[in-house]
Amino acid sequence: MTDPQPVLAALADPTRRAVFERLTSQGPASASLLAEELPVSRQAIAKHLGQLDAVGLVERSEQGREVVYSARVAGLGQVAGWLESVGSAWDTRLERLRQSFDA
Amino acid sequence: MTDPQPVLAALADPTRRAVFERLTSQGPASASLLAEELPVSRQAIAKHLGQLDAVGLVERSEQGREVVYSARVAGLGQVAGWLESVGSAWDTRLERLRQSFDA
DNA sequence: CGGTGGTGCAACTCGTCAGTTGCATAAGGA
DNA sequence: TCCTTATGCAACTGACGAGTTGCACCACCG
């Protein structure tokens, strides 16, 4: 399991998460199109897409002169895995506590 | 389902997440104790604990003159819920796509 | 062949936040 | 009671990051 830090950091920003959710629910889009739908400049969107791409939450594909981004839901696996590991560590601790009292 | 933003933001910081993981795996601890285990000052830890408490990831309990914090794993439900909603939005979109091609 | 729309790069501003230091306060223990 | 130890409050610093503006570049369309 790799470090969930980059993905968590990427999801922590509201605008960036809005972009990601937009791509998951409405499908692929270019930076320019997203900039029209969201209240920020195209460059801001482009930066966010770059970061989302860097952490594997988004996929970049060039179509002609346009650059279209699509969501990579699998990238959320990092977070899911971390949640799971935390949960299991918690359960393990509870189990140890139970045993110490059962003894 | 409430906004996952605060919890995600809280988990985005490495030190803060380290504190949280420490509490889930090794059990409750005071700010002073945590400050000895982590390479930051007690005040820094105290701030992090305050934020974790504000978003429901940690529980504060006073024992004598000490203040002990314990992990609230349930607080992660916010994130789990968000992951689930994103996943279902994704699935819905896939389903629509499939239908449009089956027709 | 002009021009229009879509990208990319770079510099700059500004706010937020992690972390620190310093001081005040209060509660246990010897 | 004195001293140690745990906490809380406040001010300050430094850095990272989101967002903007400006400019250059290039592909497609009329």
Image (tube, coloured by chain):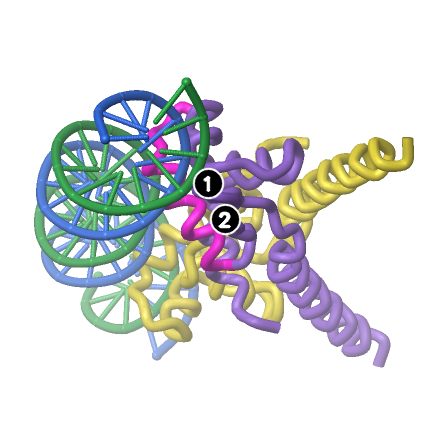
Chain colours: A purple, B yellow, C blue, D green
Residue type for callout 1: Glu
Residue at x 53% of width, y 50% of height: A61
Q: Give the chain letter at badge 2.
A: A
Which one is in front, B1 or A7?
A7
Relative placement, left or right, of B88 versus A71 is right
Identity of the residue furthest to the right in this view: B103
Image coordinates for residue A34, horizontal then vertical, percent: 47, 31
Image coordinates for residue A38, horizontal then vertical, percent: 45, 26
Relative placement, left or right, of C8 versus B71 is left
- Alpha-carbon neighbours of circle 2 within 10 Å: few (<14), some, or many (≥20)? few
Q: Give the chain letter at badge 1.
A: A
In this picture, is C15 found above or below A51?
Answer: above
Residue at x 59% of width, y 39% of height: A28
Image coordinates for residue A5, horizontal then vertical, percent: 48, 61
Disc 2 on helix, strand or loop? strand
Residue at x 59% of width, y 57% of height: B71
**How far apart, in angstroms, are the residues tagged by discs 2 and 1?**
6 Å
Residue type for callout 2: Glu
Image coordinates for residue B46, horizontal then vertical, percent: 37, 54
The verdict on residue A42 being magenta is yes
Which one is in front, D26 or D6?
D26
Q: Is residue B29 visible?
A: yes
Contact between marks 2 and 1 (CB within 8 A): the answer is yes
Q: Which residue is mark 2?
A: A62
Give the magenta-colored segment's residue range. Answer: A39-55
Q: Is residue B53 visible?
A: no
Disc 1 on helix, strand or loop? strand
For the N terminus of chain B, which image quadrant? top right
Q: Which residue is mark 1?
A: A66
